[in-house]
């Protein structure tokens, strides 16, 4: 599954958006959003078991609310990983849909300045802004950057593509030790011994 490239040391943000493609039209998209600096603060993973932190629960709640608040949005597969989330979002534009617009600069996707209302960039940007605002309120860290700038998406073109992505999402926790987003990638012995390998970072991030 191709996504925007990340080096092992410095995140490189690359837009994977199709030139000239209307991201407000009906369609299904595979979305990946990463925490700033790849901080592992959303959950712990042991095998296939995921234990969400309070921050991780907020993220899951806000992702679900994307569909609850927007009749043009439907959700499919979704998983919270220690430092990123994967989800399938389906857009079916409707007339007169009521949308919540997150206040401030975080209301639009950083990948696209001035994203149009109801577009993929706007919806993901609102999800990021709402979840970051709640997490910062919980921690008392108002204004702190929580998410990595931008997000990665793949346009789902057919049913076979969708099924492959559903499988990828479902299997993602088991593959965490090898995930390129894992700061401790390659520590297979930890997973094989049953040790929790998605643990949070020490310090302020450990509090949630």
Image: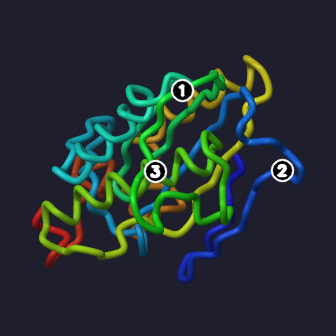
Q: Seen from this angle, which residue lies furthest top?
A: 159
Q: Do the residues labelled 3 and 2 touch (CB within 8 Å)?
A: no
2 or 1: mark nearer the eye: 1
The percent coordinates of residue 205 (x first, y second) are: 20, 70
Picture layout, residue 125 above or below residue 8: above
**Residue found at x 68% / y 54%:** 3
145 sits left or right of 53 in the view:
right
3 or 2: mark nearer the eye: 3
Disc nearer the start of the sequence (3/2) = 2
Q: Residue 183 carries which label?
A: none
The percent coordinates of residue 104 (x first, y second) are: 42, 66
Instruction: Calculate the distance from the C-alpha at mark 2 to the C-alpha at mark 1.
Output: 25 Å
Q: Are marks 2 and 1 in contact (CB under 8 Å)?
A: no
Q: Is mark 2 on a helix, strand or loop?
A: loop
174 sits left or right of 90 in the view:
left
Instruction: Calculate the distance from the C-alpha at mark 3 to the C-alpha at mark 2.
Output: 21 Å
What residue would you read off at disc 3? 126
1 or 3: mark nearer the eye: 1
Q: Is mark 3 on a helix, strand or loop?
A: helix
**Residue found at x 56% / y 76%:** 8
The percent coordinates of residue 109 (x first, y second) are: 58, 58
The crowding category of the residue bearing disc 1, from other C-alpha atoms within 10 Å (few below 14, some 14 to 19, many at least 20), is few
Q: Nearer the viewer, residue 33 or 61?
A: 61
**Residue found at x 84% / y 44%:** 21
Instruction: Calculate the distance from the C-alpha at mark 1 to the C-alpha at mark 3.
Output: 16 Å
Q: Nearer the viewer, residue 106 or 40?
A: 106
Tally the marks. 3
The percent coordinates of residue 54 (x first, y second) are: 16, 50
Disc nearer the start of the sequence (2/1) = 2
Q: Residue 97 carries which label?
A: 1
Q: Is mark 1 on a helix, strand or loop?
A: loop
Q: Residue 18 carries which label?
A: 2
């Amino acid at each position: 599954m191709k996504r925007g490239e990340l080096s092992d040391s410095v995140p490189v943000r690359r837009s994977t958006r199709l030139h000239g493609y209307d991201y407000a039209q009906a369609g299904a998209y595979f979305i990946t959003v990463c925490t700033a600096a790849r901080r592992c603060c959303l959950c712990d993973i042991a095998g296939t078991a995921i234990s969400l932190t309070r921050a991780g629960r907020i993220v899951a709640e806000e992702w679900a609310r994307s569909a609850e608040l927007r009749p043009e949005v439907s959700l499919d597969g979704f998983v919270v990983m220690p430092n990123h989330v994967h989800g399938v979002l389906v857009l079916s534009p409707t007339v007169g849909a009521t949308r919540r617009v997150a206040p401030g600069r975080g209301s639009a996707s950083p990948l696209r300045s001035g994203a149009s209302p109801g577009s993929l960039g706007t919806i993901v940007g609102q999800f990021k802004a709402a979840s970051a605002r709640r997490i910062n309120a919980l921690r008392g860290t108002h204004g702190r950057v929580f998410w990595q700038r931008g997000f990665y998406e793949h346009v789902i073109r057919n049913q076979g593509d969708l099924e492959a992505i559903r499988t990828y999402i479902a299997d993602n926790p088991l593959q965490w030790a090898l995930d390129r987003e894992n700061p401790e990638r390659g520590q297979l012995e930890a997973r094989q011994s049953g040790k929790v390998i998605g643990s949070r970072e020490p310090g302020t991030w450990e509090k949630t």
